[in-house]
């Protein structure tokens, strides 16, 4: 898997609410655990459409999105530069934690993923539903679960695990990327795509005639995370997210990227 690392500048939306902490002001213990290389390596998922988790790339290949802005704000708080480590899915971000691929990340929280990373607070609450193919007779969430319906999601993600639990008759397949799933739907090989609602609403624009179903089959938080065994880093990440929610920074970042869903309340955490 190709992984490309980018250094991104501070987004304008951060200026009004970001911390003025400098590196000299930051506890050395925090820097040792959260930015041991002298830069904050932020693991991010990049896909074709943006969401509270997914970033996108511009024509030059530079990633932009909610996680980019939050990672940049945390790096500024620490007084170090951000370095964005790009992955194709939340599953890839999760698996990279054990090998030291990143220092902090943002991802949907669930029990399987909590075995591999330490979650801080949620910063966003999201629901997952289905996008059905053009001309599909599927009208409701319940209609998806019937013999012969071909459901695709991104492999090793919270969403596909939620779909697997809810589906008893439809077949569900994990793909490496959203782009692959879109190509398959356009080729008539996919009846329904399982993803977060915000991602699907953007994706529907790329597949004329497709529809996002009302309701949801899974609800979860999207949270900040650090690798296992780093309690000081976890406390610092927790403080950052709670401050960012309280100051309105998270809301401003979401708004800047057209994400209309709710900011998670104070203390919201994966259980």
Image (cartoon, grey):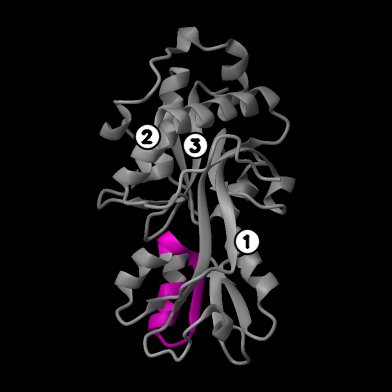
Mark 1–mark 3 Cα distance, whole angstroms, equals 20 Å
Q: Residue at position x 63%, y 25% from top?
A: 235
Asked which secondary structure carries label 3, the reply is: strand
Given residues 62 and 236, the one toward you in this image is: 236
User: In this figure, which residue is indicated by the disc labeled 3?
Assistant: 42
Where residue 20 appears, as percent x and y from the top left, is: 38, 15
Mark 2–mark 1 Cα distance, whole angstroms, equals 27 Å
On the question of residue 11 being in view, the answer is no
Q: Quadrant of the C terminus?
A: top right
Q: Residue at position x 42%, y 68% from top?
A: 179
User: In this figure, which residue is indicated by the disc labeled 2?
Assistant: 7
In the drawing, does residue 114 fall left or right of residue 195?
right
Give yes or no for contact between labels 3 and 2 (Cβ–Cβ under 8 Å): no
Asked which secondary structure carries label 2, the reply is: loop
Q: Which residues are magenta?
A: 181-199
Mark 2 Cα shell of 10 Å, populated few (<14), some (14-19), many (≥20): some
In magenta segment, residue 244: no
Residue 8 against residue 179 in the figure, above or below: above
Given residues 5 and 188, the one toward you in this image is: 188
User: In this figure, which residue is indicated by the disc labeled 1?
Assistant: 156
In magenta segment, residue 189: yes
Give yes or no for contact between labels 2 and 1 (Cβ–Cβ under 8 Å): no
């Amino acid at each position: 898997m190709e992984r490309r690392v980018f250094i991104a500048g501070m987004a304008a939306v951060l200026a009004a609410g970001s911390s003025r902490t400098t590196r000299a002001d930051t506890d050395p213990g925090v820097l040792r655990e959260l930015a041991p290389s002298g830069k904050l390596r932020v693991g991010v998922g990049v896909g074709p459409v943006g969401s509270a988790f997914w970033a996108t790339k511009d024509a030059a290949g530079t990633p932009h999105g909610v996680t980019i802005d939050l990672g940049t704000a945390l790096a500024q708080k620490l007084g170090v530069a951000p370095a964005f480590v790009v992955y194709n899915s939340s599953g890839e971000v999760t698996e990279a934690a054990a090998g030291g691929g990143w220092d902090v990340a943002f991802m949907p929280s669930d029990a399987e993923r909590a075995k591999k990373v330490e979650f801080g607070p949620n910063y966003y609450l999201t629901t997952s539903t289905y996008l059905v193919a053009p001309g599909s007779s599927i009208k409701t969430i319940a209609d998806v679960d019937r013999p012969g319906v071909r459901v695709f999601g991104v492999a090793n993600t919270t969403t596909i695990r939620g779909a697997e639990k809810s589906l008893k008759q439809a077949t569900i397949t994990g793909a490496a990327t959203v782009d692959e799933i879109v190509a398959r739907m356009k080729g008539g090989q996919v009846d329904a795509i399982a993803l977060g609602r915000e991602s699907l609403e953007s994706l529907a624009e790329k597949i004329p005639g497709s529809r996002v179903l009302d309701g949801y089959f899974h609800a979860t938080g999207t949270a900040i995370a650090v690798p296992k065994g780093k309690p000081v880093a976890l406390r610092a990440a927790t403080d950052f997210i709670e401050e960012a929610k309280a100051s309105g920074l998270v809301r401003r970042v979401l708004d800047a990227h057209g994400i209309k869903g709710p900011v998670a309340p104070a203390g919201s955490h994966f259980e």
